[in-house]
């Protein structure tokens, strides 16, 4: 029914009500079965609502901003708790993550979980796990600049929403992307720096990627030093 038809019908009902003595009602009070909330006002209300992890996840899952959308099985938004002690940021989904839609669930992920557990952390209780890119690059190749650029706002929104106390950056690719540098990971790791995310500054520690530790046992000791540094920083910033 058009708006004009509704107005005419409402006027007719008003007139009928006056005749039958059932009382006056303003035409604006009539409700018609096709009076649906119009989608443009819904969108405006949605835009005004605070951002949320659910909104980011939905946007990630429907994203087609780069070519990885065509080859992914599942996008991998990330998972964990709000206000985590630590946000772990890795590179991007591999085959297991692509198959499940969950971050760090393959061999490297299992090692990551053990590393976190060794310093009292877990994705279930006090961490959030995400990646710089949310879709798997074919054959696990490095993400390309247009792909990291297309994904950047998702990670920025996640950081703004969850407000992690610290960031643990896993591996060269994530560190290079987030710090906009090409310095070797061996020189970036082992020290906290201030990471600016919008209007918040977050202590940021880079370390080796768990897959690198699986390939090279020698990296396990420095990675353990990094974890101890992380634990110390968490305790120092406890409030
Ligand atoms: N490697 C990553 O960097 N991220 C994952 O989610 C899995 C493996």
Image (tube, grey):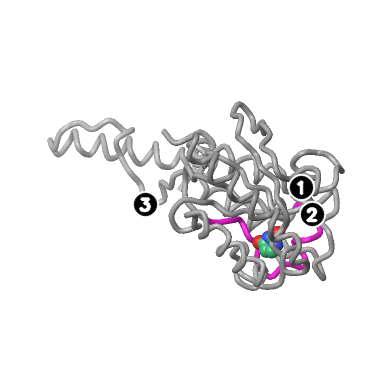
Q: Is residue 120 magenta?
A: no
Q: Label for residue 111?
A: none
Q: Secondary structure at mark 3?
A: loop
Q: Residue at 64% across / 57% down in the picture?
A: 62
Q: Nearer the viewer, residue 88 or 20?
A: 88
Residues marked 2 and 1 touching at CB (< 8 Å): yes
In the image, residue 21 sits, relative to residue 81, either above or below, namely above
Q: Is residue 66 magenta?
A: yes
Q: Secondary structure at mark 1?
A: helix
Along the horizontal axis of the image, is 180 left or right of 7?
right
Q: Residues within 10 Å of mark 1 (few under 14, many from 20)?
A: some
Q: Which residues are magenta?
A: 65-79
x, y percent for residue 69: 74, 61
Question: Which of disc 3 and disc 1 is earlier in sequence?
Answer: 3
**Spatial distance from mark 2 to mark 1, Cα to Cα?**
6 Å
Q: Which residue is mark 3?
A: 33
Q: Label for residue 66?
A: 2
Q: Secondary structure at mark 2?
A: loop
In terms of image quadrants, where is residue 178?
top right
Q: Residue at 68% across / 48% down in the picture?
A: 169
x, y percent for residue 72: 72, 67
Ligand 1 in which quarter: bottom right
Q: Which residue is mark 1?
A: 150
Question: Which of disc 2 and disc 3 is earlier in sequence?
Answer: 3
* Beta carbon at label 3 within 8 Å of ligand 1: no
Residues marked 3 and 2 touching at CB (< 8 Å): no
Q: Quadrant of the C terminus?
A: top left
Q: How many marks?
A: 3
In the image, residue 78 sits, relative to residue 153, either above or below, namely below
């Amino acid at each position: 029914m058009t708006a004009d038809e509704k107005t005419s019908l409402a006027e007719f009902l008003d007139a009928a009500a006056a005749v039958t003595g059932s009382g006056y009602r303003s035409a604006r009070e009539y409700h018609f079965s096709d009076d649906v909330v119009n989608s443009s006002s819904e969108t405006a209300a949605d835009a005004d609502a605070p951002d949320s992890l659910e909104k980011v996840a939905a946007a990630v899952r429907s994203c087609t901003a780069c070519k990885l959308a065509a080859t992914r099985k599942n996008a991998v938004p990330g998972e964990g708790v709000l206000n985590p002690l630590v946000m772990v940021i890795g590179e991007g989904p591999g085959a297991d993550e692509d198959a499940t839609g969950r971050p760090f669930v393959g061999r490297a992920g299992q090692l990551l979980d053990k590393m976190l557990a060794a310093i009292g952390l877990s994705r279930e209780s006090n961490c959030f796990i995400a990646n710089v890119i949310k879709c798997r690059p074919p054959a696990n190749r490095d993400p390309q600049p247009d792909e990291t650029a297309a994904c950047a706002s998702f990670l920025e929104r996640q950081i703004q929403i969850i407000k992690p106390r610290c960031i643990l950056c896993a591996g060269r690719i994530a560190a290079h992307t987030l710090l906009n540098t090409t310095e070797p990971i061996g020189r970036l790791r082992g020290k906290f720096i201030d990471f600016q995310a919008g209007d918040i500054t977050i202590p940021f520690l880079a370390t080796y990627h768990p897959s690198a530790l699986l390939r090279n046992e020698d990296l396990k000791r420095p990675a353990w030093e990094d974890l101890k540094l992380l634990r110390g920083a968490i305790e120092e910033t406890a409030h």
